[in-house]
Amino acid sequence: MDDFLSQPGPKTAAVQKHLQVAILGTGMGGLCMAVQLRRAGIDSFVMLEKEDEIGGTWRDNTYPGSGCDVPSHLYSFSFEPKVNWSRKFALQPEILDYMKHVTRKYGLRPFIRFNTEADEARFDEAAGLWRIRTRAGEEITANVVVSGTGQLNRPFTPDLPGIESFAGKAFHSARWDQSVDLQGKNVAVIGNGASAIQFVPQIAPKAKKLTVFQRSANWIVPKADRPYTDFEQRMFRRFPWLVKLHRLQIYLRLELNYLAFVRGSFFGKLFEKASLKELEAHIKDPELRAKLTPDYPAGCKRILLSNDWFPTMARENVDVCTSHVEKVTSDAIVTRDGVSHPTDVIIYSTGFVTTTFLAPMKVVGRNNVDLNTAWANGAEAHRGVAIAGFPNFFMLYGPNTNLGHNSIIFMIECQVNYIMQCIGALRNPKVRYIDVKKEAEDAFNRDLQEDMQSTVWAAGCSSWYKTADGKVTNNWSSFTAKYWWQMRHPDFAEYRVVG
């Protein structure tokens, strides 16, 4: 059996058993997985989607100005390039349209069960399959489960004292209330992260007064965005190799940006210099400039791209408040310094619950071990995709596969390639399940966390990249090229193979 697995791939077995694959989610990861299953001739799969449409984060985040901070041509699948991106950094509607195009072209809709949320997945060791219970109480069985729920799917909303007495509207940016008219209103934005950077400049001209409640300042650098010209789009359509060359050029440029995340690096100082130059150019008030100057190394928190954040902060109707929120009243937010800020609308830009990954779904593996127990000291997985004690269970955009410098789509394609080879091995009738060995998972994560110490992500600031006790569970610790090299083929010596 080990000899068979030493040559991975679906064509190595003379006889291939029927496998049922369950994919959780229809974001970029889930769609990529489904397409590759279809391309491999595997149609025995189901996609479980809790909402009534595909798209994941790009379905959910419809706030004004919502878009991607990775260049469009690289934020798309290598096997399905889009030649007519309208601009260098696409906005949410165009990205969602691209995802719907992929869904149509590869015939994925018949495989999707909408409005079906997985509540629990439990491994049946005797049968070698997973029993998935939906929120509606239905049971679905699958030999293989692939989680495509990602890291940014559960909005985090702080429990502000007195919020129940607030008479106005309050909502999270990832659940934008399109019915709320902000014209002439006093708007409070709690948080100033990647979403706020995009929507605050869009809504500031409408608001009577807009107050940004800031916990810490961001490192913000200019965004090299512009529309693609008609000529460029014609060339991309006429010469497909130009698209590949353009993608490669973008990839290599972004890959070099990793050097900025090495602690104390020269490149990191260049990022800081560029950000401070923008700050000084737009913010003349020394008090406001001090508020907007970060006190931690660039990259320790997410570096943000924007051309209009600093000009927006300088508007007369915009205020940056750095005092902590003490409580909410019926018509105001009161901060710790005793100031009452009149408020008609509260918008939470407070990010997502990122370090628990698969929650609130319960996942139970071999020997009745709950994944929450296995992850008591912080989420981790072997190469970001497999978890010891949870056979035939794989993750996309799992622990330590997020990036600060390049495209997550590249990482997802590496993971899907790896998982497809694992599925190929599982199609051998002699193999019931494969389970990564704990010692292999531990060795991988030990090396990863050791590498992490040389990066700014392990610096002293708090961020969504790490747990409360400081363990970095979200980010990859090196170049994406290193991840690609490690994910070319599974090493089945790192797995227990059970027939």
Image (tube, rainbow, N blue to C red):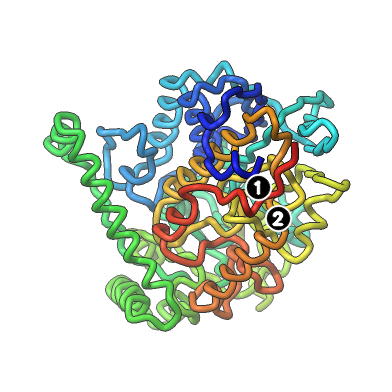
Percent position of residue 68, x then y = 41, 48
Q: Looking at the figure, which quarter contains the C terminus?
A: top right
Q: CA distance from mark 2 to mark 1?
A: 30 Å
Identified at 47% across, 46% down, the residue is: 414
State left or right for residue 243 relative to residue 32: left
Q: Earlier in the sequence, mark 2 or mark 1?
A: 1
Q: Quadrant of residue 141?
A: top right
| Camera-nearest residue between 411 and 332 | 411
Q: Quadrant of residue 132?
A: top right
Q: Quadrant of the N terminus?
A: top right
Amino acid at pointer 1 = Arg
Look at the picture and state if 205 lies above or below 49.
below
Residue indicated by mark 1: 154
Q: Where is mark 2, residue-wise? A: 437
Q: Amino acid at mark 2?
A: Lys
Q: Residue at x 49, y 78 (%)?
A: 454
